[in-house]
Amino acid sequence: MQALKDKIVREGIVLNENVLKVDSFLNHRVDPELMAGIGKAFAERFVDSSVDLVLTLESSGIAPALMAALELKVPLIFARKQLSLTMKEDLHVEPVYSFTKQVQSQVAVSRKFLSEGQDVLIIDDFLAHGEAAFGMARIVEAAGSRVAGIGIVIEKAFQNGHAKLAEAGYRVESLARVASLADHRVTFAE
Ligand code: G4P
């Protein structure tokens, strides 16, 4: 998606050869117009798939996932990393390890909103090692539903998440694929 790549080049800050800071439009401040375009781009990529709902992980996945859900005219569920006071009901819970943050969190979705027999599109802001996407896929499958696909805003193609997810049989669509962050420059894969 060219508008996203242009934004990354203009506003992205390469912190080191593994981490790209994009807090001006995705991870802290959010650019609504760009998000609307991202929603359309995901809807186009998954136009041939049956999708009953979109699933993401709080917090930075919510903005792009909401716009994708709006385009696809389906509900959005965001998995919680911190259980809210009101989440007392039956939950699907999966551990998700973050390589970037080196912490493990318990990710939860209420059984009330994710039941069996649904086609679920997983959306996330970043794909690195694929841990978050695998965690969400485990939740979908434990609920007796199916992963319709995985949509990623920014994939770090030099890390192994995409390959692992593809090997496991998931269709992964990334709107920007970063090939390298070496020399404080962003190079795209295609
Ligand atoms: P993985 O899920 O693909 O294995 O990735 P990883 O554990 O490495 O990522 C954990 C968190 O770090 C995620 O955010 C992810 O979006 C973020 N992250 C990974 N690589 C980068 C990067 O290069 N730049 C930025 N800006 N973020 C990165 P999170 O903990 O879920 O945070 P948030 O959604 O609450 O913002």
Image: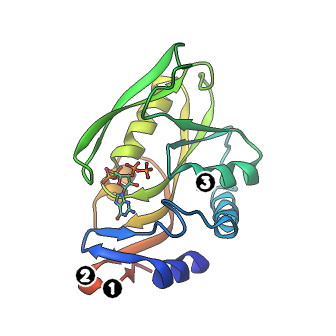
Left or right, residue 184 beside residue 170: left
Amino acid under label 1? Arg
Secondary structure under tag 1 reads: loop
Dividing the picture into quarters, in which one does residue 17 lie? bottom left
Contact between marks 2 and 3 (CB within 8 A): the answer is no
Above/below status of 105 relative to 87: below
Q: Where is residue 126 in the image (x, y as percent from the top left)?
A: 43, 58
Q: Name the residue under label 3.
A: 63
Q: How crowded is mark 2: few (under 14 residues within 10 Å), some or many (20 or more)?
A: few
Q: In percent of the image, x 46 and y 26: which residue is there?
A: 83
Foreground: 67 or 173?
67
**Residue at (45% x, 37% y) in the render:** 137
Q: Residue furthest right?
A: 73
Q: Tag 1 or tag 3, which sits nearer the N-term?
A: 3
Residue ID for mark 2: 182
**Mark 3 closeness class: few <14, some 14–19, many ≥20 residues within 10 Å:** many
- Using the image as rendered, state which of residue 17 and residue 188 is in the foreground: 17
Q: Are marks 1 and 2 in contact (CB under 8 Å)?
A: yes
Residue 140 placement (x, y as % from top left) = 50, 31
Q: Work out how far the residue at label 2 is from the one at label 3, CA to CA, in angstroms.
A: 28 Å
Q: Which is more N-terminal, label 3 or label 2?
A: 3
For the N terminus, the quadrant is: bottom right
- Pinpoint residue 89: horizontal percent, then vertical percent: 54, 13
Q: Which amino acid does label 3 sit on?
A: Ala
Instruction: Point out which mark residue 185 bears.
Output: 1
| Residue beneath the point at 51% across and 13% down | 90
x and y percentages locating residue 85 in the rendered image: 52, 20
Asked if 122 appears above or below 110 in the picture, the reply is below
